[in-house]
Image: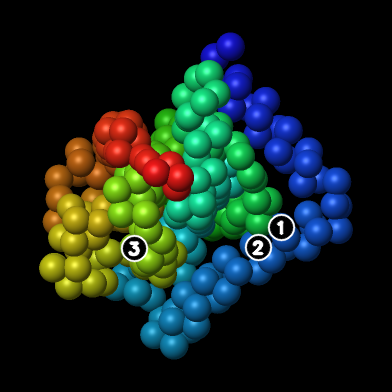
Amino acid sequence: MSPVRAWWMLTRAAVRAQAQYRVNVVVTILAGVVYQGVGLASIAVVLHRFGDLGTWSVAEVTFLYALRLTAHGVWVAPFNQLLSIDEIVREGHFDRFLVRPGNPLLYFLTYRVSLMPTGDLLGGLVLLAAASAVTPIDWSVAAVAYVVLAVLGGACLEFGIQLGLGALTFRTLSTQALRSTIDTVFNTFGGYPMHIFSGTAQFVSTFVLPLAFVAYLPGTVLMNRTGELRVPGWLAAGSPLVGCLLLAGAYTIWVRELRRYQSSGH
């Protein structure tokens, strides 16, 4: 059985278990939508107070926010179990994944599935569709394909960062504070055009904590605004590839750090 098929079967079983409590499922998903709606509302307040952000219109900023939120939802909806890695490792539950045939990461990611992040994905898709209708983008087959690639690349990038840092839990037993901080940074600033920040902040958001590759850089490509960038246009256009490379590197770190895992009984 292929890893993808195995992941799908295990995830479907976990979702079915959650779906037995239908009211809770609906409330949980709505809670996710509301949570992300608060983030959009904060940006709306800033735009209402100051108008356009550094020549970026309301529609353009909304598109960036939707692009980032959709990418976030694509990774966190199916793989949110990664967020609980500290608890799983400290309490020794990871042992059960090591004695099963196949990749331990596959079993870990499908151990439990929360449906709340599904609200992130649904909210992102709806907002992205609405923003796409009013954003000045020359829509074509190539542009639509690039949006899909940008979303997948952004999802890989965020997933990769969380996976790489989560792997350090095998060494330190706790990375939640760091991972939560980075997730907050992505949620807070990922929907803004980096052009409005200082040169130092733009450098950090591109080459240190590369959140610019999730929405801002691919957004400038789609809206033909690469002239304002401090990086080459080809690098912005290659944003989806950056996410894939980062995820591949994070998986390498995961495999290496997994060797350091010690059961809580040791």
Q: Position of residue 171 (x, y in %)?
A: 29, 48
Verify CB contact (< 8 Å) between mark 3 and mark 2.
no
Q: Please say if 131 is above or below 170.
A: below
Element type at marker 1?
helix
The answer to which of 261 and 241 lies nearer the viewer is 261
Neighbours of disc 3 within 10 Å: few (<14), some (14-19), many (20+): few
Q: Position of residue 64 (x, y in %)?
A: 43, 58
Q: Residue at x 18, y 53 (%)?
A: 207
Q: Position of residue 260 (x, y in %)?
A: 30, 39
Verify CB contact (< 8 Å) between mark 2 and mark 1.
yes
Kind of residue sitting beneath label 1: Ile
Answer with mark 3 or mark 1, whichever residue precedes in sequence.
1
Alpha-carbon distance for marks 3 and 2?
24 Å
Q: Position of residue 238 (x, y in %)?
A: 27, 37
Q: Residue at x 77, y 46 (%)?
A: 18
The residue that mark 3 highlights is 178
Left or right: residue 104 versus residue 115 is: left
Neighbours of disc 1 within 10 Å: few (<14), some (14-19), many (20+): many
The answer to which of 96 and 33 lies nearer the viewer is 96
Kind of residue sitting beneath label 3: Leu
Element type at marker 3?
helix
Q: Nearer the viewer, mark 3 or mark 2?
A: 3
Q: Please say if 35 is above or below 249.
A: below
The answer to which of 133 and 169 lies nearer the viewer is 169
Answer with mark 3 or mark 2, whichever residue precedes in sequence.
2
Q: Nearer the viewer, mark 2 or mark 1?
A: 1
Q: Residue at x 45, y 47 (%)?
A: 264
The residue that mark 2 highlights is 33
The residue that mark 1 highlights is 29
